[in-house]
Amino acid sequence: MNPYLKRLLEERAAIADTMSEITTKAGEEKRPLTEAERGSLDKQEKRAKEIDDELEVLETRSTANQRYMEIAGRLSQQEEKEERSAAQRRGEPPIETRSFGQQFAESEQVKEYSGRGNGHAVEFQGFIEHRAAISGAITTATGSGASWFSSLTQPQRVEFTDPIAPTPFLDAIGREQVSLGAIEYVRWDMRGPEAGGPIPETDLKPQANLAPPEIVPVSLKTYAHWVPISRQALEDLPRIQSIVETQLRDGLRRKLQSVALAAFAAATIPAADGTGLTGIRQAVGQLEALGIPAPSLVLNPIDYANLDVEAADASNSGPTQFGRIWGLNTIPAPLPQGTAYVGDLRDAVTWFDRNQYSVYLTDSHADYFIRNTLVILAEARAEFVVTHPEALLAVELPEPTEPETTAAATSSK
């Protein structure tokens, strides 16, 4: 059984047991459900509905795959039957499907062999491929003297695919799995008011001035692409489907990262006090002074390299190592050069994700069914929001300066 399907079924069974325990306990105690029990039941029912929807999709997909297998089997049998009929009409010997061992054991020569003396030779049909005799002048694309039989040989095909492109920014931001295409999220201030005190036992406690939350609506968007592929190609080279699916998923991830980066670039991020390497360290201090963790540093890969070179030159250690800057989790991302962002990226940016990456295989498009053509479709529903811009600080990175030693050597020439 598919591990994901098994996990869904186990979770669904556990939810049913939990709901049964809650209602049974209330019945045995002859009392209505408490507020907490009703809330737990509502939560369990919501999750059960999500699982039931996913199971229905998986069942539909399984049924469709089974249907394709049945169709492929019938078509294969029909093609073999038509090929035999065509060979018979051309007066060719019937196509032999038995193995050479079966043909030998069932041959008349073996049956008539007495067990001693010489037997008769057994001839196998199709044992060696026979080509039609070559007639006429032999010409080649490479002129006289070339090997004429090169046209009869086929080169070995070796496939290469581009490596999967990394998506470091997409992997570093926060992610919320949602069950609908239209949602609302509640945005609270990152830090509430500080408590009063010390307070004598008999005095009144002060009321907290808690700011009301902001409810923000979000509509998910769909990102997708598809390719047509022949059924026979999938039958002959099953690896094609895996390659195509991987490429489609990779294209989706790169698209989602570019959308996330666009949302990030459009947000207003507070500016740090300093610049460059010093400004990055000062930004960490500014955030920590406000009680905000600053575990991440996001910047363009070229800026990242320049900062590493600057640090190596300043320490006179040379290019012996590179990596984290000020101990931060450094994330190179295709952002505009000249600005680095320090702070809690996972809390600042949220990826609202409906279905991760769904890949569908179908022939239900135009006349693709009668053309023996299938469609592989990859799709994702998502939206990206900078939910807490105050969790980050933007640090300006000045243009890298040329080292003095290099400048002196250049001027002396």
Image (spheres, rainbow, N blue to C red):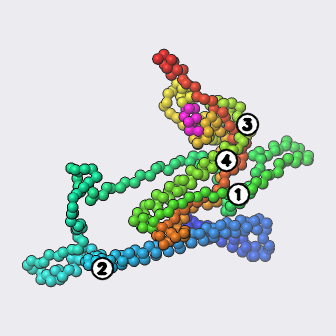
- The image quadrant that residue 225 belongs to is bottom right
> Foreground residue, 117 or 333?
333
305 part of magenta stretch: yes
- The image quadrant that residue 302 belongs to is top right
Q: Amino acid at mark 3?
A: Ala
SS for callout 4: helix
Above/below status of 319 relative to 144: above
Residue, far left: 117
Marks 4 and 3, how far apart in space? 27 Å
Q: Amino acid at mark 1?
A: Ser
Residue 89: give its label: 2
The residue identified by callout 1 is 219
388 part of magenta stretch: no
The residue identified by callout 4 is 263
Range of magenta residues = 299-308
Residue 40 at x, y percent in the picture: 73, 66
For the point 48% across and 16% down, the residue is: 412
Total label count?
A: 4
The answer to whether residue 177 is seen in the rendering is no
Sequence-first tag of 1 and 3: 1
The residue identified by callout 3 is 289
Marks 2 and 4, how far apart in space? 67 Å
Looking at the rendered image, the disc whose residue lies closer to the viewer, 2 or 3, is 2
Q: Amino acid at mark 2?
A: Arg
Residue 272: give its label: none
Q: Amino acid at mark 4?
A: Ala
Sequence-first tag of 4 and 3: 4
For the point 57% across and 46% down, the residue is: 168
